[in-house]
Amino acid sequence: MSEQRTSTVGTLRRLWPYVRPVRGRIFLVIVAALTAMLCGLGIPLVTQRIVDGPIARGELASLPSLVLGVLALGCAEAGLFYTRRKLIARPSTQVEANMRAELYHQLQRLPIAFHDRWQSGQLLSRAVNDLNTVRRFVAFAAIFLVVNSLVLLIGLGVLFHLSPALGLVLLCCSLPLLVISYLFETKFKVVARKAQDQSGDLTTSVEESVLGIRVLKAFGRGPELTKRFREQAQELRGTELHKVRIFALLWATLIVLPELAVAGQLAVGSVGIADGTTSVGTLVAAITVSAYLRWPTDSIGWLLAETNQAASACERYWEVMDEPRTVVGPSNPEPLARPVRGHVRFEGVRFAHPSAEGEILRGVDLDVRPGETIALVGATGSGKTTLTALVPRLADVTGGRITVDGVDVRDLDLAELRRVVGTAFEEPVLFSASVTENIALGSPDVGEADVRQALRVARAEDFVEALPWGLATRIGEQGLSLSGGQRQRLALARAVVGRPAVLVLDDPLSALDVHTEAEVEAALRRVLHDVTALVVAHRPSTVQLADRVALLDDGRIAAVGTHEQLLATNAEYRRLLSTVEDMTEEEVAAR
Amino acid sequence: MSTEDEGWRGVAAEEFEDVDHATGVKLRARSRRLLGSLLRPRLRPSLLALAIVVTENLVVLAGPLLIAGAIDRGVPAALEGRPGVLAWCVGGYAVTAMAATVLRYSFVRLTGRIGQDLLLDLRERIFRHAQRLSIGFHESYTSGKVISRMTSDVDSLQDLLEMGLDGFLTSLLSIVGITTVLLWLDVPLAAITLAGFIPLILLVRWFQRRSARAYRGTRGAIAKIIVQFVETMNGMRAVQAFRRESRNENIMDGLNNRFRDANTDALSVMATFTALVRVIGNVSLAVVLAVGALRVAGGTLEIGVLAAFTLYLRRFYDPFDEIAMFTNSYSSATAALEKISGLLEEQPSVPEPTRPTPLRHAHGEVRFHGVEFGYRADSPLVLPKFDLHVPAGRTVALVGATGAGKSTLAKLVARFYDPTAGSVRLDGVDLREVADEDLRRAVVMVTQENFLFDGSVADNIALGKPSATRAEIEAAAAEIGAHEFIAALPHGYDTDVRKRGGRLSAGQRQMVAFARAFLADPAVLVLDEATSSLDVPTEHAVQAALETVLADRTAFIIAHRLSTVLIADRVLVVDAGLIVEDGSPEELIGDGGRFADLHSAWQDSLA
């Protein structure tokens, strides 16, 4: 369909790299489909000849070979059918699988900022819905768009050969196809895109309703959410019905065109017969051919619909694929000198969220000496978590730099950096996998002994051993659920398992009860002894782990010193860390 | 630890994936029932659609007759100077074409509407049902699977409705019509043709079974992809920080290949089926041709009848392609409906009472009466039998080691679970007899996981009370000291929190969750580790707020920070599901038991 706007063609052309490896097969499929169609045209013609010829003349002797001929043609047709479907099965599903694998690959490399911005339902609907549409397009629509256009052209050629006048009638009736296709593309594609986006929003709602089920239950907000979901689903229904309206109009028009052609041919042909320029036989043949062209013409409707949906599905796919991977390793990474000492320096580090005005960090200077543990203290929302995320490059600084052993983290190989820097988040994420897998995370250089050692350090060995299948027990969402404290200890084990030189721990003790906290603290003290560590702390007890404390205030490091020094000299620090002490002592005294 | 042997997944009680014959029959019956229940309310428009498509087919059938008339009679008449007949025929043909167009247009719109209504109905049903199912169900069924039920499974039904139905109806009509014509033309030849039905029926049955299996495979595989995808996206920070990308890609490749193979399998089955249908059609054509020729030679059949018969025979087998396509979509949809109907048949283990005892304004008196609880019948009890009475307005703190059963006890108050024995009563009414609406107004639970929904800060606080005005929302936030930070956000209360509250820090998310609970203004408030991420001044502000807010309501507080525990009137020390100490904080400190130890350990940690 050459009249498609370049945008559609342009979008679909980008499919080529995925289709290229299977282009040979697709060519064969097109040949098979075309030949099968010609067989379909041939069989009745041959049958007719046999009936009118040998059978009518009673020549039974030649009959067996003729019948066998029909049978052979029939089997060839069936074989071509089989070939076409069989040949396209694997390439189409392979294209889908490859595209999904690449999408997944890309998503895992896009920065966290991207993931914060994009609704996960929109990503999921791209990975499932849209690629499903692309598969269907590759398996059917793309093939038949070619085959049917060819059949139409061949049919037109035959007609012109029979009678230019009758051919002209069909051509005239086919011309509106081009206009319709253009109009259709401009209108239908917009609506198809809207439907896909709304379907993505619906997926987001579904995902949130399931992941947030505890909150929804706790507040009994199921009915309200269902109502909102219903409204969204109704919007989608409205868009789909709009699509149906456009499609119905297109289809109705496509049906009427060949019929009008036949009626026109009848009229023109009769005039020709009256003139003596056309024979009755020619007219019959022309009408037969036109009738045969009905399916290829009719089907253009859904082929165009499929093509446009595939184009907008691709558009959605490319949107994600075209997102820049802003956090990437350099092409020529600088090596870290061995052994890694773990000297971390923040030099004038600034950070602003991509869309937010105003910086969260406004020039952080901090020197964490090798082997030293620094506690990072600051008010809620002061940017402590952001600062820790900058070290393993979950986000990049917007100004200044962070160095490890004197090398800017952005000049290090990304995997190397993340191996050197071990992290534990405040909200520990567990994957649906065995305990071992959750600790080792598939790293080839971590053995079971290392995993056990890490569990011991995090004081998690006992409870893990007590699980039904020990270290092999599946945990995470699809397995056994663990308490907050248990999860946090596993996250800690995960952070220390690779013996990283630098540890970044975001409030690693927040969900532990007092006794466990004391145990983990003791373990941590051992771990922290010989690594460099940056520990976000909310509690005096966590601060006790550190050699020095840095106070983050107003986007800068306001003070550095020991806990006692800061308590004595810094009012903000006192406010942050000593109030509870004072208050509870008063309270305890009062009670 | 290769990804092939799936050892990395770890061991867990698995659901069965292979379906034996009897189960397959049961599953199909179940999905048919669901389809029936979806179609029943749309019976009238469906019948109308059927009538339209029948009429359209009849109108289309008239076309060839008119052409024949035009050529056989109209043209000769026109040549003799009487163009009337030809004009009538051509005009009539144009009219049938227009009529067919109008009918097709209304058919497409009508079936489009029926299909969309049906999808809306199904989506809402699953969504509503999933919301009704208990936490226990969600914890074992997993989010990814529920999501795939509501998304990709519904989509495959949509495919059926969009692509298959109309071709199927037209094909069936055409088969019935042509069979009639064949029988009318010549009974013995028609008998030969109909004999082809025997292998055809066997083939269709094989195809149904085989494609049902193939599509069950695709549904299972895509659900696994969705599960993996959702888990990766929600744990992206951990994925990147721990370099799990390539491991994940191996896993995804495995799942992706399974889906690809399942789909390839389904398409191959389809290839075999359509090809064999063609073979049957063409063989019966050859047989009819041979037998017909003999009979023409024997003089028992007219040549014209044979000619017509072969022409119709060809058209007879054409629709079987459409039917194969339909059966294909149908198999895919049925496999999806099997899964969906399975979800819909789950009964909430914490069901709403059919005749609830009204509880408009709860006072908040909570009583555990001979309560026992275990998560599963075959696992040991988490809470052995106990009694507990909390008068209205009291603040009770639960203290104990991780896994002692504090959270479980709290969940029983919020009726996330029902006790295995005994009853939990609110104002003397068994929670099982309280309507959900009343219960949720009376009891609100705030947990450590502060799920934030897509939307603004205000939206997320308003979740506590959807009818709240902006002033009420701000007041709730101000009361717990969250107003300041919210006001400092770029758009204040209208700031988009981003996915899962990514824009806010953990402590800020917790404050929003708190504001939500305060806004809800329940008689009983359950706080499970709800302040763990707050910094000290903020926590203090929350505590101060708690002391005023909790003055006139019942509260259960789980906190490992003793500063929070100390605001309670009463402390329960829980160990291995048993309440081992019970008293006011001062009493317990004075008694020198576990709580006293805990308290002194904590004081040491402050020093």
Image: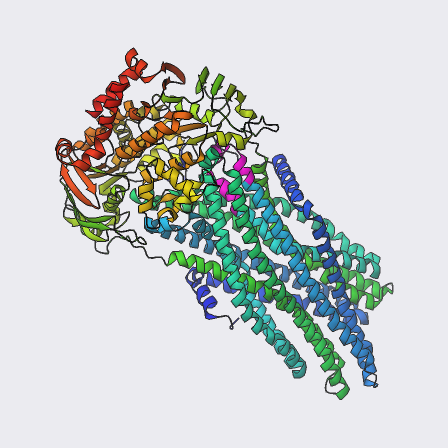
The segment highlighted magenta reads B128-151
Q: Quadrant of the N terminus of chain B?
A: top left
Going by the image, does A60 lie left or right of A325? right
* Image x and y of residue B375, in percent: 47, 24
Going by the image, does B27 lie left or right of B590? right
Q: Residue furthest right?
A: B299
Figure disc tally = 0
Q: Quadrant of the C terminus of chain B?
A: top left
Q: Residue furthest front?
A: B471
Magenta stretch holds residue B142: yes
Is the image coloured rainbow, by chain, by secondary structure, or in one colour? rainbow
Looking at the picture, does residue B46 appear above or below residue B406?
below
Going by the image, does A447 lie left or right of B19? left
Point 78% across, 72% down: residue: B66
Point 56% across, 38% down: residue: B129
Looking at the picture, does residue A275 appear above or below residue A239?
below
State the residue in front, B504 or B43: B504
* Image x and y of residue A454, in percent: 27, 31
State the residue in front, A174 or B416: B416
Looking at the picture, does residue B382 appear above or below residue A24?
above
Point 77% across, 58% down: residue: B177
Magenta stretch holds residue B147: yes
State the residue in front, A346 or A523: A346
Going by the image, does A431 lie left or right of B342? left
Res. B250 in view: no
* Image x and y of residue A25, in percent: 49, 61
